[in-house]
Image (spheres, grey):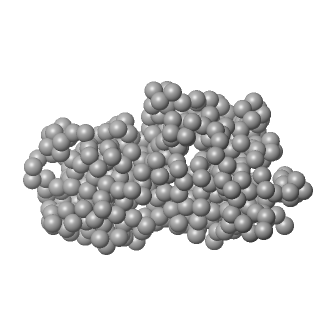
């Protein structure tokens, strides 16, 4: 049976870290506007600009209305290669072509490290990197593709695929401790493979938003006495917008000054707008549409609190982002939410607890001092933990440990570990 890491450290000593410029390939399915994608782009940017590494970001096409990060990558001078066959949907023939394309890229670049993100790119990319004998293969779990709100068949398929892929990488990175717990409970990987590295962001932009609160509220059409609750998410299944539509009538009957600001776009936009119109709620919900990531800090600063009713997230970036801005959070207790949302920083609810969601909104709407205190505590706790510089430094240290451990291993041990495909 293969041990993890596959090449043990001799004599139980810590490996001597190897400091050198690395060739690194990051692989993600889509470079759309989203948390996992922003995380990955910041990692690639930090490795290239701060650590001097030669990094290539490989991605599939950006399909859908969510917008993409290609322009941002170009402005930062990052190397990006698009593999048209690397698509989100499961298509065996297309996936096989993506696997072949990824192997060809890896052979050409000859990286010391391949780091994959998202389930599809993670499975295909790890298989390609392992077959090419890449010295260090790493995968980040931003969110698990299986869980209680998925069908039994989908869960069986994805658990089997993730177990298979976990045997074809040297390390698994979780964006929160909850991801590690859930993955291990499903039999994905071994404890020694896992490291938690919290998702990084440009913390200073959230601590000091570029535009004033009054200016942003005027732009959004919010009156001084209205209490605005923002939701930052794609307009997509499992993001919780339907739950807000369901409880909004009672919330507005109890407090007509409440307003909802939905930041983002997606395939459910027209249907949600129609639902709101039928319920007579269109006046209370502001759709910002697609906005660039750089506008998120000022939009959060312009509202009074944040609601995140998603049912599958990993650790949603909007939770620490809201707290860094100084806004309390109402969130469902899923995945890593409880690692940042505590009684001191917000309100945590059972998933789809609609009566609890209604009560939480009304509680914060009528208590500005509670909103201020929770937001201030969030800023105090998380200002350092979620900086992208911290994330990149921790990931690079992981790469160094893996390469140092491999350098100390015996050739026979390395060969035995790699001969599992």
Along the line of sight, which residue is nearer the eye, 180 or 306?
180
| Residue 309, horizontal then vertical, whole percent | 38, 60
- Which residue is pictured at 15% across the width and 63% down the height? 368
Residue 194 falls in which quadrant of the image? bottom right
| Residue 123, horizontal then vertical, whole percent | 69, 49
- Which residue is pictured at 62% across the width and 29% down the height? 81
| Residue 154, horizontal then vertical, whole percent | 64, 58
From the viewer's perspective, is residue 82 above or below residue 51? above
Determine whether, in the image, residue 45 is placed left or right of residue 193.
left
- Which residue is pictured at 30% across the width and 66% down the height? 345
Determine whether, in the image, residue 219 is placed left or right of residue 106.
left
Residue 163 shows in the view: no
Along the line of sight, which residue is nearer the eye, 360 or 55?
55
- Which residue is pictured at 50% across the width and 39% down the height? 50
Determine whether, in the image, residue 179 is placed left or right of residue 113.
left
Along the line of sight, which residue is nearer the eye, 96 or 327?
327
| Residue 363, horizontal then vertical, whole percent | 20, 69
Residue 121 falls in which quadrant of the image? top right
Determine the residue located farthest toward the right in the rendered image: 412
- How many callouts does the rendering have? 0
From the viewer's perspective, is residue 160 above or below residue 231? below
Residue 407 shows in the view: yes
Q: Quadrant of the N terminus?
A: bottom right
């Amino acid at each position: 049976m293969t041990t993890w890491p596959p090449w043990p450290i001799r004599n139980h000593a810590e490996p001597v870290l190897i400091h050198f410029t690395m060739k690194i390939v990051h692989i993600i399915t889509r470079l759309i506007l989203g948390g996992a994608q922003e995380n990955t782009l910041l990692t690639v940017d930090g490795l290239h600009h701060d650590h001097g590494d030669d990094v290539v970001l490989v991605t599939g096409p950006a399909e859908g209305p969510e917008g993409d990060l290609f322009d941002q990558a170009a402005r930062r001078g990052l190397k990006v290669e698009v593999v048209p066959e690397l698509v989100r949907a499961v298509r065996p023939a297309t996936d096989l072509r993506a696997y072949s394309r990824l192997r060809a890229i890896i052979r050409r670049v000859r990286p010391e490290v391949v780091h994959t993100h998202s389930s599809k790119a993670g499975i295909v990319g790890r298989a390609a990197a392992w077959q090419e004998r890449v010295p260090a293969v790493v995968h980040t779990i931003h969110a698990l593709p299986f869980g209680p709100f998925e069908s039994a068949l989908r869960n069986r398929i994805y658990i089997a695929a993730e177990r298979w892929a976990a045997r074809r990488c040297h390390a698994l990175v979780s964006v929160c401790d909850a991801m590690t717990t859930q993955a291990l409970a499903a039999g994905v990987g071994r404890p020694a493979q896992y490291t938690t590295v919290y998702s990084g962001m440009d913390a200073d932009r959230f601590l000091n938003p570029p535009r004033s609160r009054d200016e942003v509220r005027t732009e959004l059409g919010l009156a001084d006495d209205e209490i605005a609750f923002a939701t930052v998410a794609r307009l997509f299944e499992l993001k919780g917008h339907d739950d807000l539509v369901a409880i909004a009538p009672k919330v507005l009957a109890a407090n007509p000054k409440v307003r909802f600001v939905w930041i983002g776009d997606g395939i459910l936009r027209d249907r949600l707008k129609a639902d709101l119109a039928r319920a007579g709620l269109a006046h209370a919900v502001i759709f910002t549409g697609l906005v660039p990531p750089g506008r998120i800090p000022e939009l959060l600063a312009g509202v009074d609190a944040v609601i995140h009713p998603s049912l599958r997230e990993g650790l949603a970036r909007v939770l620490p982002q809201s707290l860094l801005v100084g806004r309390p959070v109402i969130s469902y207790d899923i995945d890593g939410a409880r690692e940042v949302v505590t009684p001191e920083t917000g309100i945590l609810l059972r998933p789809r607890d609609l009566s609890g969601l209604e009560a939480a909104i009304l509680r914060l709407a009528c208590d500005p001092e509670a909103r201020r205190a929770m937001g201030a505590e969030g800023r105090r706790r998380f200002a350092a933990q979620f900086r992208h510089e911290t994330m990149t430094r921790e990931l690079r240290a992981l790469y160094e440990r893996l390469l140092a451990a491999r350098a100390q291993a015996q050739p026979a041990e390395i060969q035995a570990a790699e001969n599992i495909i």
